[in-house]
Image (cartoon, rainbow, N blue to C red):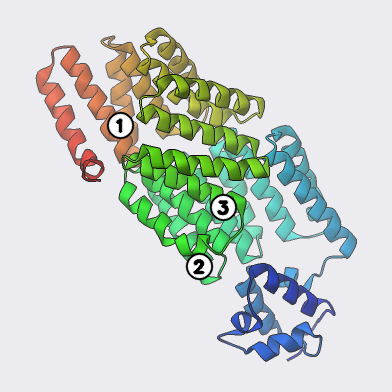
């Protein structure tokens, strides 16, 4: 039962990681070993084989190398500090400092031949690219991180990022498949934080597709896992998506309660960008309650925060809803101005579904202007190409209303008929 290269700290690392996961010695050992074997390793009386190390590493969602702690202590400390700096800057919304810190982390990790920390740096840089709307670059970094990641936990985190980025890029079906896989893997390795994050992101992709009932079911499926974790970010994301789902199902007041709970959790983490995005979700719910003035003010504040943080992709997406709020308030000229500026920004990014959504808002603001028909036809085609059923239905409804306004009744009826199948699930909810 000895390894070819045992380290004296493996027992200590095993105990540290086991306790961090909240597992007993028996829970870690089964079904292949028993608790006494783990107890002897942790006490330094047994040296595990490479197979045993692989088994325990898989259960603990880390790499074998991380479990054996092969890096010199000074280098590991330097890498941990660089990673902490990168995450802190990202949380604070300081995108420039976050990029510098991640690049420094990658440089140190490359020099120390640590694939795991290289993957962490690439994951961080991918998140920055994603927030700036550079989806192709983000996907490239995530895929490279996936190749380098050694621990199960990091591989799952990268898969979550890939699922989110593919959804933004318009491949909703693939996004759902990736996130379902990540959810299953998280539950298999008893990483409940990962399961909650996967369910939250998967629900968002399902919502984009208009499948609100399945989104609610996915969120409900991780209720037990959520009760076993104390991770503010994961719990905030869960509340956020519960808010979005309940709002889509017509329970706007309940949605506001979930969003308020999420905001408290994000404030605890001083997560500037997440708070701004959450405020936009709250503004969207206020729109559903016809509280348009409050919504418009929240959108303005959130957009300003995101612009200041350099999250241009996020900011552009909120401009669409800001334009919609102004339209609902009867400020048609303001709505046109904001939507046109938003559309110009979105066309430099890689977010086709959001671009289509903005086209619909601009068309509604333009009224009978012939440009509206061109915008709406383009929006319908984009949504059809990417499987965004709910957005397609909205674009078709708007197109039908345009035809009614311009006296083209037969074309209006055709547009409404085409929209009807995608409206059925939501009506039934």
On screen, residue 272 above or below 265: above
Density class for disc 2 (Cα within 10 Å; few <14, some 14-19, many ≥20) is: some
Asked whether the viewer can see residue 329, the reply is yes
Quarter that holds the N terminus: bottom right
Q: Nearer the viewer, mark 1 or mark 3?
A: 3
Q: Residue furthest left?
A: 410
Asked whether the viewer can see residue 102, the reply is no
Q: Position of residue 84 (x, y in %)?
A: 76, 49
Q: Nearer the viewer, residue 53 or 228?
A: 228
How far apart in space, not on screen, are marks 1 and 2 (Cα)? 38 Å
Q: Which mark is residue 187?
A: 2
Contact check, label 2 and label 3, Cβ < 8 Å: no
Q: Residue at x 81, y 82 (%)?
A: 6
Q: Position of residue 327 (x, y in %)?
A: 37, 16
Residue receiving disc 3:
234
Q: Earlier in the sequence, mark 1 or mark 2?
A: 2
Residue receiving disc 1:
381
Q: Nearer the viewer, residue 113 or 246?
A: 246
Q: Earlier in the sequence, mark 1 or mark 3?
A: 3
């Amino acid at each position: 039962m000895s390894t070819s290269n045992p380290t004296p700290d493996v027992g200590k690392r095993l105990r540290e990681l086991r306790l961090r996961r909240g597992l007993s010695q028996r829970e870690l050992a089964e079904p292949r070993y028993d608790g006494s074997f783990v107890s002897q390793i942790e006490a330094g009386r047994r040296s595990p084989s490479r197979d045993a190390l692989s088994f325990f590493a898989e259960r603990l969602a880390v790499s074998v190398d991380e479990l054996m702690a092969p890096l010199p202590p000074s280098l590991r400390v330097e890498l941990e500090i660089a990673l902490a700096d990168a995450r802190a800057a990202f949380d604070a919304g300081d995108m420039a400092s976050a990029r510098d810190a991640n690049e420094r982390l990658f440089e140190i990790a490359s020099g120390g031949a640590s694939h795991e920390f290289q993957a962490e740096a690439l994951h961080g840089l991918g998140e920055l690219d994603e927030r700036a709307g550079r989806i192709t670059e983000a996907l490239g970094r995530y895929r490279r991180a996936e190749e380098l990641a050694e621990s199960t936990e990091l591989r799952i985190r990268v898969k979550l990022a890939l699922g989110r980025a593919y959804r933004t890029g318009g491949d909703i079906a693939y996004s759902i498949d990736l996130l379902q896989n990540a959810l299953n893997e998280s539950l298999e390795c008893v990483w409940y934080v990962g399961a909650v994050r996967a369910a939250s992101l998967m629900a968002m992709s399902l919502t984009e597709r208009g499948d609100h009932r399945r989104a609610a079911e996915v969120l409900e499926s991780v209720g037990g896992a959520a009760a076993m974790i104390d991770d503010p970010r994961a719990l905030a994301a869960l509340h956020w998506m519960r808010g979005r789902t309940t709002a889509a199902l017509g329970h706007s007041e309940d949605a506001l309660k979930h969003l308020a709970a999420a905001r408290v959790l994000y404030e605890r983490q001083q997560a500037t960008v997440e708070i701004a995005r959450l405020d936009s979700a709250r503004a969207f719910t206020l729109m559903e309650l016809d509280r348009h003035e409050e919504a418009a003010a929240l959108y303005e504040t959130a957009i300003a925060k995101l612009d200041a943080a350099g999250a241009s992709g996020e900011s552009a997406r909120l401009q669409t809803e800001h334009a919609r709020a102004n339209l609902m308030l009867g400020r048609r000229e303001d709505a046109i101005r904001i939507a046109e500026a938003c559309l110009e920004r979105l066309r430099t990014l890689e977010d086709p579904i959001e671009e289509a959504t903005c086209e619909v808002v601009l068309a509604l603001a333009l009224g009978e202007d012939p440009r509206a028909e061109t915008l709406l036809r383009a929006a319908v085609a984009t949504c059809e190409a990417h499987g965004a059923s709910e957005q397609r239905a909205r674009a078709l409804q708007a197109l039908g209303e345009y035809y009614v306004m311009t006296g083209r009744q037969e074309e209006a009826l055709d547009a409404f008929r085409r929209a009807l199948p995608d409206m059925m699930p939501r009506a039934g909810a």
